[in-house]
Image: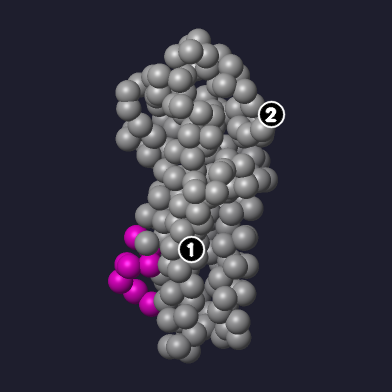
Amino acid sequence: MSTAEETAGGEAQAWGEVTPDAARRLLIAAVEAFAERGYHATTTRDIAGRAGMSPAALYIHYKTKEELLHRISRIGHEKALEILRTASRREGSATERLAGAVSSFVRWHAGGRTTARVVQYELESLGPDARAEILALRRQVDGEVRGIIEEGARSGEFEVIDVHGTTLAVLSLCIDVARWFNVDGPRTPEQVGELYADLVLRMVGAQGPAA
């Protein structure tokens, strides 16, 4: 499945905010190229060619290659934060909300794995100012998951000694799905989400029927 197919619906509808159409096509082409070749090995000519445009056309919409990566990263992190924030604010126990957060987060990384790989693994390619902005979003992502785990630990639903370390482990587990998930593999994004939700509940020692 290509990035264009991934972006046809579901999580990747986030690209709908990128206008005009030419700017969106260039952004999608950049995602494909960065995921396939890496940011530093990709040229603006590569991106423009994938989008069916001339290199000069790219500069009408994006001043630099880094600006493209920055926009991809910002939109991706904002979507990830939205997914976790929605799950963490639902009614229900900490166990139910952590399961929902993990399941949704994993589905996003599996279903849009090409985009997710660029969003999660090209941070160091950004300049200092852009990197600082994305790191601030990452701290908010971390805070949503940590908040659920802290609540579960306080209520006695979870048996967690190190909340910070456990939060890092949960996020790392979810994010890594983008690296290995194969659309032709034995599991769908939904099935992987359910599996990982169960694994994370076991990790935090969730107690009670919801576990």
Question: Residue shown at 43%/67% (left/top)?
Answer: 144
Question: Residue shown at 62%/23% (left/top)?
Answer: 43
Amino acid type for the residue under numbered disc 1: Arg
Foreground residue among 158 and 71: 71
Question: Residue shown at 44%/38% (left/top)?
Answer: 71
Left or right of residue 35: residue 67: left
Residue 107 lies, with reference to residue 52, above or below; the image says below
2 is within the stretch colored magenta: no
What element does badge 1 sit on? helix
Question: Residue shown at 62%/74% (left/top)?
Answer: 165
Crowding at mark 2 (Cα within 10 Å: few <14, some 14-19, many 20+): few
Please give the range of residues in magenta.
86-93
Residue 66 lies, with reference to residue 91, above or below; the image says above
Dot 1 or dot 2: first in sequence order is 2
What element does badge 2 sit on? loop
| Position in image of residue 5 (x %, y %) | 48, 28
Amino acid type for the residue under numbered disc 2: Ala
Q: How is the structure coloured here? A: one colour
| Position in image of residue 26 (x %, y %) | 47, 23
Q: Which mark is residue 139?
A: 1
Q: Which mark is residue 41?
A: 2
Classified by dominant secondary structure, the portion drawn in magenta counts as loop
List the single residue furthest toward the front.
Answer: 128
Determine the image quadrant of residue 147.
Answer: bottom left
Left or right of residue 199: residue 158: left
Residue 147 lies, with reference to residue 8, above or below; the image says below
Left or right of residue 107: residue 125: right
Visible residue check, residue 173: yes
Determine the image quadrant of residue 44.
Answer: top right
Q: Measure how far apart labels 1 and 2 are at the Cα level.
A: 29 Å
Determine the image quadrant of residue 122.
Answer: top right
Crowding at mark 1 (Cα within 10 Å: few <14, some 14-19, many 20+): few
